[in-house]
Image (cartoon, rainbow, N blue to C red):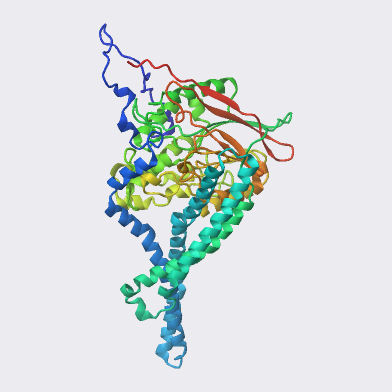
Amino acid sequence: MSSASRFGQADLMGSDHQDHTGSGGAVPAVLIDPRRGDIEDDAASPAQRSLLAIAGNLLVEVSLPKLLFVWLILMVVPAILIGVAPLVISAWLHTLSDRLTTLSEIGAGLTLVAVAAVGWIGWRPLFRMAETSFWSLNALAVQPGYAIGREGLRHLVEQLVGRKLGNDSRARLRSLSAIAAGVLLCAGAALIAMLAWPASRWTAGLNDLLQPHRLAWTLLANALVLISSYVALASLSWGFADATMHQPVGLAEFDSRVPGARCWRVAHMSDIHVVGERYGFRIESGRAGPSGNTRLARALAQLAAIHQADPLDHVLITGDMTDAGRASEWAEFLDALARHPQLAARCILLPGNHDLNIVDRANPARLHLPFSPLKRLRQMRALAVLSSVQGGRVRVGDGSGPAAPTLNDVLASYRQTISAFADRGGLRNAAALRSLFDDQFPMVIVPEDENGLGIAILNSNADTHFSFTNALGLLCLDQVRRLEAILNRHPKAHWIVALHHHLVEYPMPVTSFSKRIGTALINGSWFARKLEPLGQRLIVMHGHRHMDWIGRCGALKIISAPSVVMNSKDDCASSFYIHTLSAGPDGTLRLLPPQRVDVAGENDHRI
């Protein structure tokens, strides 16, 4: 469906929460009002239930055969590929050396040429498989292990010394906990490597490789030694890098506007979690948050009125537009935007974990097999909506300028494949779209001139297959490299770097360990260090935490958007912000005091 036809749809939502009367009589009261929800609406809500209770249900309901199969595909197979690589190389070298000693024979010479050709052709795919497996394990186990250790130490110390810590004390705590986590993880990894070393083997002949069943434990031991050795070195590097970086602090003051300087007004919303039912409740908040989508409708109406009086340049929504990535939820979201075409024309979207990674909104024990087409289907739904809203305005590829293709240009050749996949599913159609989603990021709103404002739109969602781990965030190395190339091609431009997940846990007390784990980018500290040298001319905007926070890591300013629907009940107000960015005379990007937009709660007229 085209953008024009989608945004021209009629308003089908009606007026929510209205009492309806029959012919001359009021609706009779009901013993249990279904519009208020019940305990079933809180089944997967961490705001209404403890994580321990949710985990208990998970252990009872999880499919163990499917879990073991996923573990085999994602963990054991990559480990075997890593472990076999040195044996294949040694076998090739052994065969090559044997042929070198018998070069006087013509047959041996020809065999030598054949062996050398096989090695020359085969080392690249072997290296690529080992490299992919290595980074897959790194993302699944190594970096999360370091992050859990670091945040666990911080949480433990904060609970022991009391939560009322000053900014300086909290910064020192963050630095010391990073070093301690690095040292402890290094020691643990070194111990594992030493224990696995006796079972490892680093040379093999061709005959050994022809009997792989005898090498199974050897291959796993090799992988353990290699991964553990890497962890021992990398964890120390991560720990000291995190300890010496600028720690996050709240922004002390906003910048002032230079007379005559260019300014851009950017409305920043996030985590609106549109549901597909009139009285639907959101997964995370359950009945602790508002039902339906009327809060979003009021927020957009207020924003449209503000835009009419003082025009906006961009409306940025940093992920979680939907609550579970369902087609009905995307339809409700598009209907909401259709009522405000002036906002839709300025809207910029990026995917959140709820848009992509919710396997089952009612059951956190559900998981997909790694090759399940349902994960790809959620990606294609999100990509179709991004194309409908901003596909003609964002550039993909290198994003260097007008010559770069738009998102719609790229998707034009995939239109039939995407339609066939959405209509019929199937593993073959899913495989044809395997890398399409990831390859489109970063999407870029190109600066209007060399000193203009550009927006880099990232996908920060980890590739998870388990509802319980849906919130994990990770920026892949290829995407960051493309972002760096884009920023370097526009050395004088100003930038908003927009993503869903927050880079670091913010310096404020939390009551539970679950608030620290499974939310921030796993490699967020590394990404913050990457961006900090450019901090004078860019600002990071994100969502995910549903938290109102504006701060900085050194020169890098960071803006966290609150959610207009997740942190308040029906009758309570919520808010979002309109930020004004200004170009400084020295090429810097200034952040002026924001405009807060309060969205009133609604009077509850339900019977």
Image point 42% across, 33% down: which residue? 273
Give the residue displayed 33% in from the left and 48% down from the top. 367
Q: Position of residue 25 (x, y in %)?
A: 26, 8
- Residue 64 lies, with reference to residue 258, above or below; the image says below
Q: Position of residue 111 (x, y in %)?
A: 41, 84
Residue at the image point whose x is 31% and y is 28% from the top: 38
Q: Quadrant of the N terminus?
A: top left
Q: How many marks?
A: 0
Nearest to the observer: residue 31 or residue 122: 31
Residue 417 seen in this snapshot: no
| Front in this rendered view, residue 285 or 539 | 285
Camera-side residue of 112 and 292: 292
Above or below residue 575? Residue 181 is below
Q: In the figure, is residue 578 to the left or right of 217?
A: right
Quadrant of the snapshot with the C terminus: top left
Residue 540: image location, x then y, percent: 58, 41
Q: Is residue 40 above or below residue 378?
A: above
- In the rendered image, which quarter is residue 359 located in? top left
Viewer-proximal residue among 559 and 174: 174
Q: Is residue 423 above or below residue 256?
A: below
User: Horizontally, is 241 left or right of 415 in the view?
Assistant: right
Q: Is residue 524 visible?
A: yes
Instruction: Name the residue at the bottom extreme.
Output: 104
Q: Residue furthest top?
A: 24
Residue 283 occupies quadrant:
top left
List x then y, in percent, for residue 527: 57, 49
